[in-house]
């Protein structure tokens, strides 16, 4: 009779400890996933910054290319002996300026699309981290409730066995 009750208490304690361990594992897994997400998001933020820098560098290179083209055109006109009348260059300058604006606009659009794609992935990662934390809480609660219910069942079984032997 006493042995049955002690066995029931041990089974109850074991159920509670098992539930606590499952809860700790779920919490630990969520913490690890959140850490991974933080590292990935940091890398993505750095990637965003590099995209911004590359776009700015591309714009500067394109502007420099346009400036050099204008200087080369002016040098060609000067070498040709044409004097003050450089209306020919005005058309070329306008065309080069328009092409430069289009190129820079394309660079900016492409970089904005890439930066927004990265920002979307960061947002998805943050949501995934929140879901991982929520899943861990649910799993922990479930494990604890299961452990307590198992413990209660063991105690009741032990009490019934004990009562049966007493009668």
Image: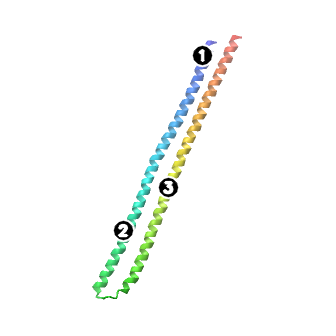
Of the numbered discs 2 and 3, the one sitting upstream in the chain is 2
Query: Along the horizontal axis of the image, is 134 left or right of 114?
Result: right
Residue 95 spot, x, y in % from top left: 42, 79
Residue under the point 52% across and 33% down: 24
Name the residue beneath numbered marker 1. Answer: 6
Identify the image quadrant of the C terminus.
Answer: top right
Name the residue beneath numbered marker 3. Answer: 119
Q: How is the image coloured?
A: rainbow
Q: Are marks 2 and 1 in contact (CB under 8 Å)?
A: no
Name the residue beneath numbered marker 2. Answer: 61
Marks 1 and 3 sit apart, C-alpha to C-alpha, by: 58 Å
Q: For marks 1 and 3, give the one nearer the viewer.
A: 3
Residue under the point 50% across and 59% down: 116
Reply above or below: 23 against 61. Answer: above
Identify the image quadrant of the N terminus.
Answer: top right
Residue under the point 57% across and 40% down: 135
Residue under the point 37% across and 67% down: 60
How many numbered dots are placed on residues in this image? 3
Residue 87 spot, x, y in % from top left: 37, 86
């Amino acid at each position: 009779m006493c042995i049955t009750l002690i066995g029931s208490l041990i089974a109850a304690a074991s159920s509670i400890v098992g539930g606590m361990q499952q809860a700790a594992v779920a919490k630990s897994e969520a913490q690890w996933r959140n850490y991974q997400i933080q590292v990935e998001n940091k890398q993505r933020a750095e990637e965003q910054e590099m995209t911004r820098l590359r776009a700015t560098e591309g714009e500067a290179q394109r502007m420099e290319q346009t400036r050099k083209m204008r200087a080369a055109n002016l040098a060609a006109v000067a070498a040709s002996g044409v004097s003050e009348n450089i209306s020919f260059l005005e058309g070329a300058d306008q065309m080069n300026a328009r092409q430069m604006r289009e190129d820079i606009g394309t660079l900016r659009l492409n970089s904005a699309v890439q930066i927004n794609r990265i920002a979307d992935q960061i947002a998805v990662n943050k949501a995934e981290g929140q879901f991982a934390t929520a899943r861990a809480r649910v799993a922990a609660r479930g494990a604890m409730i299961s452990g307590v219910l198992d413990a209660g069942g063991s105690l009741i079984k032990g009490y019934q066995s004990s009562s049966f032997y007493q009668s």
